[in-house]
């Protein structure tokens, strides 16, 4: 008995040990895994299932297959909100990325002023959407608002930003950029501080001027951060909701109605849960595609 | 190729003076090594020459040109950093080309210079790799090649070998010496390693606490250390120091009394020594040999015996609160715990007065 046992342990100790380690690992992630399955995966799957049904809050009536999706494809309002959302993403994501980098470059100094300014620029991020939209409604208000006062002082007729179908979305984009700029800035600041000082010194000795150094040393060094910033911002800005909900109610004439507002109104105003769930799946797919496309494009570039 | 002149340069960080009125002339084609303990300001001087630190006081000339107000890129210098500082996202070739492109060098000239430098440093096969795909030694060669292609008036090295393992360090050291012979360029090299300084330098500048302690050829530094600091910093194993009393010996030479009362005659002229000072004698281990016949001046107990092959180092406790490192032949039979007698070659002894200034035998 002892003999066989010792032979066994001698021949397969590696396998045994590795298994034990694996289970230890699972134990460590178990709390998070449980929450993840319960709070994220389950609702996600329920959402997918809901999108194939017709029903309201009191229960699912019946399974309808792809009917909801077919209806979405033919829904002119849904098409409009998709365009609105894409337009908003195009307005905000590149601007947030470029401005975030520019601010980080400008404030990447160890002086007290730079520290104060960094804090100020980041502080808008911690405000709630209610406060942010309140402030910016006051800015955009045609009579008595900040921009209105300025244009009156210049002898111009004040523009009603939030009531103009052409200007309402840009106004919401400006509000959003002001609100969200802190995160890209901080991410870029962290990245810039990782660049070894010696690289800049070597570049200075190699006779590189400011722009050459920015282009050849700094930008390549923050490339990964740029990718992360863009993916994060794509995911965030596709989910635009609070700002139009509080500033324009989706108007004027649906010009600022994004997908999430559409989902919200379809689900919780018209009680068409299945239809709303289907719209949510479309949004999910759009975010995935956009984020993945960005990921592949930039990792392809890195290889080249 | 041009020399360098530092005229009373100073550097302060806040209230702390890191370099205090340092002057130095480096001749064209000379290999000068700054040697000193960590934190003594070697890198700061080098970086002031390169233009990476501002100069608070004084002037720097490279050749005939005053450079202390020029940008780093305009000084015609190339620097090799301790951590290589290669551009991580560029290929080796682009790393080498970067500085040349920035000054608008002709494309053909660039590729010719890169090929030559790559060949001489044997990195041709690595030209299309990124720094991340190279070993430490290869990176260092690339960093050196990046300096060479610029054909600078002056090469600056800041501890370029300290990240390499011992074998590679020795090899690269040799190659740097060959490089200097081949190019004949002016080179300034910073290190805290006395072996690097001794083997590479035409002249060594020993620094301590923001000041130059001594400037001299390696053998001058070793044989006639200007101060007690230089004597202890250069030479391995460390020089032996013992407090002594000095009195007139024969021939106008100074005689010394060791702590154990033994009298020795040095070759140091008595007339020049300051009077009424307390002195310390410096005896290098190779001048304190184990006396096989038992006839010698100092006796002690062997604490540790280090066998180096061609010789042995015997660390002795003299029993009066003092220690002494002595040498013996490779086949020494001394064991730890043995009592040994040491024969001191007192004609090679150095004296240091209470200010640390060194006094030596005449000649050499
Ligand atoms: N940027 C700086 N700010 C403040 N003190 C510095 C700075 N750079 C160097 N020092 C100080 O100057 C002294 C000399 O530094 P350094 O020239 O790097 O020494 P070494 O190269 O000889 O080790 C050290 O005491 C260091 O702390
Ligand atoms: Mg240093």
Image: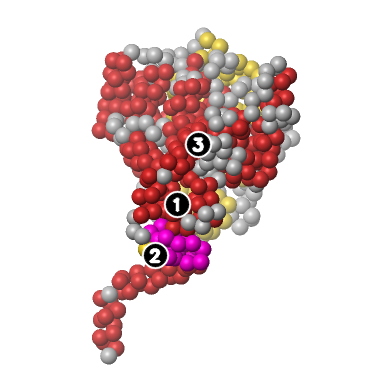
* Nearest to the observer: residue A17 or residue A201: A17
Which disc number belongs to residue A62?
2
Given the current orientation, which residue lies at the most extreme bottom position?
A: A1
Q: Which residue is mark 1?
A: A280
Q: CA distance from mark 1 to mark 2?
A: 19 Å
Q: Is residue A173 visible?
A: no
Q: Residue at x 32, y 27 (%)?
A: B93
Q: Secondary structure at mark 1?
A: helix
Q: Considering only order in the chain, which callout, 2 or 3, is on the residue closer to the N terminus?
A: 2
Q: Considering only order in the chain, which callout, 2 or 1, is on the residue closer to the N terminus?
A: 2
- x, y (%) of residue B157? 46, 29
Mark 3 in CB contact with mark 2 (< 8 angstroms)? no
Tell whether position A58 is magenta. Answer: yes
- x, y (%) of residue B130? 34, 35
Whether callout 3 and callout 1 share a subunit is answered: yes
The residue mark sitting in front, 1 or 2, is 2
**In the rendered structure, the residue with mark 3 lies on which chain?**
A
Mark count: 3
Q: Secondary structure at mark 3?
A: helix
The range drawn in magenta is A38-61
Q: CA distance from mark 3 to mark 2?
A: 36 Å
Res. B200 image quadrant: top left
For the residue with label 3, is its CB less than 8 Å from the closest atom of ligand 1?
no
Q: Residue at x 38, y 44 (%)?
A: A74
* Nearest to the observer: residue B211 or residue A41: A41
Q: Residue at x 44, y 54 (%)?
A: A275
Tell whether position A224 is magenta. Answer: no
Whether callout 1 and callout 2 share a subunit is answered: yes
Instruction: Quarter of the image for the N terminus of chain B: give it.
Output: top left
């Amino acid at each position: 008995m002892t003999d066989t046992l010792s032979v066994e342990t001698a021949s397969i100790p590696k396998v045994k040990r590795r298994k034990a380690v694996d289970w230890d690992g699972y134990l460590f992630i178990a709390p998070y895994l449980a929450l993840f399955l319960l709070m994220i995966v389950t609702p996600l799957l329920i959402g997918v299932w809901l999108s194939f049904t017709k029903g309201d809050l009191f229960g699912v009536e019946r399974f309808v297959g792809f009917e909801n999706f077919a209806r979405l494809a033919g829904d002119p309002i849904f098409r409009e909100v998709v365009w609105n959302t894409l337009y908003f993403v195009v307005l905000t994501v590149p601007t947030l990325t470029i401005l975030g980098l520019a601010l980080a470059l400008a404030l990447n100094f160890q002086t007290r002023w730079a520290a104060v300014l960094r804090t100020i620029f980041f502080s808008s991020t911690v405000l709630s959407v209610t406060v942010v939209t309140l402030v910016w409604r006051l800015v955009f208000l045609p009579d008595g608002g900040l921009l209105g006062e300025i244009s009156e002082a210049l002898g111009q007729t004040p523009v009603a930003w939030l009531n103009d179908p052409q200007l309402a979305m840009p106004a919401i984009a400006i509000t959003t950029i002001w609100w969200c700029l802190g995160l890209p800035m901080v991410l870029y600041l962290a990245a810039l501080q990782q660049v070894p000082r010696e690289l800049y010194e070597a570049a200075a000795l190699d006779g590189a001027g400011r722009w050459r150094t920015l282009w050849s040393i700094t930008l390549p060094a923050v490339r990964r951060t740029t990718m992360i910033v863009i993916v994060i911002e794509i995911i965030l800005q596709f989910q635009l909701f609070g700002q139009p909900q509080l500033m324009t109610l989706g108007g004027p004439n649906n010009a600022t109605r994004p997908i999430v507002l559409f989902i919200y109104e379809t689900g919780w105003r018209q009680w068409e849960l299945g239809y709303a769930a289907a719209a949510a799946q479309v949004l999910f797919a759009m975010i995935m595609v956009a984020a993945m496309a960005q990921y592949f494009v930039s990792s392809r570039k890195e290889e080249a | 190729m041009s020399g360098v002149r530092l005229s009373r340069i100073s550097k302060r960080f806040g209230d702390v003076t890191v370099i205090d009125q340092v002057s130095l002339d480096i001749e064209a084609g000379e290999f000068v090594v700054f040697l000193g303990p960590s934190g003594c300001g070697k890198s700061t001087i080098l970086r002031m020459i390169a233009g990476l630190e501002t100069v608070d006081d004084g002037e720097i000339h490279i050749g005939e040109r005053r450079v202390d107000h020029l940008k780093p890129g305009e000084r015609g210098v190339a620097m090799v950093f301790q951590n290589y500082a290669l551009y991580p996202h560029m290929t080796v070739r682009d790393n080498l080309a970067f500085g040349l492109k920035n000054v608008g060098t002709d494309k053909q000239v660039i590729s010719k210079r890169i090929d030559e430098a790559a060949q001489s440093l044997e990195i041709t096969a690595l030209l299309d790799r990124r720094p991340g795909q190279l070993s430490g030694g290869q990176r260092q060669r690339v960093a050196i090649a990046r300096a060479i292609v610029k054909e600078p008036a002056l090469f600056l090295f800041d501890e370029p070998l300290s990240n390499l393992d011992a074998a590679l360090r020795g090899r690269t050291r040799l190659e740097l010496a060959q490089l200097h012979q081949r190019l004949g360029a002016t080179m300034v090299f910073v290190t805290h390693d006395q072996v690097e300084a001794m083997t590479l330098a035409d002249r060594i500048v020993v620094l301590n606490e923001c000041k130059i302690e001594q400037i001299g050829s390696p053998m001058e530094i070793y044989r006639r250390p200007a101060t007690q600091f230089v004597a202890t910093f250069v030479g391995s194993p460390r020089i032996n120091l013992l407090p002594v009393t000095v009195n007139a010996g024969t021939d106008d030479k100074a005689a010394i009394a060791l702590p154990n009362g033994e009298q020795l005659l040095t070759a140091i002229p008595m007339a020049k020594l300051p009077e009424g000072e307390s002195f310390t004698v410096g005896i290098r281990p190779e001048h304190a040999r184990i006396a096989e016949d038992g006839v010698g001046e100092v006796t002690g107990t062997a604490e540790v015996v280090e066998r180096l092959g061609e010789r042995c180092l015997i660390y002795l406790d003299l029993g009066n609160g003092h220690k002494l490192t002595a040498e013996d032949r490779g086949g020494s039979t001394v064991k730890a715990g043995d009592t040994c007698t040491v024969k001191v070659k007192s004609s090679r002894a150095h004296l240091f007065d209470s200010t640390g200034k060194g006094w030596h035998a005449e000649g050499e």
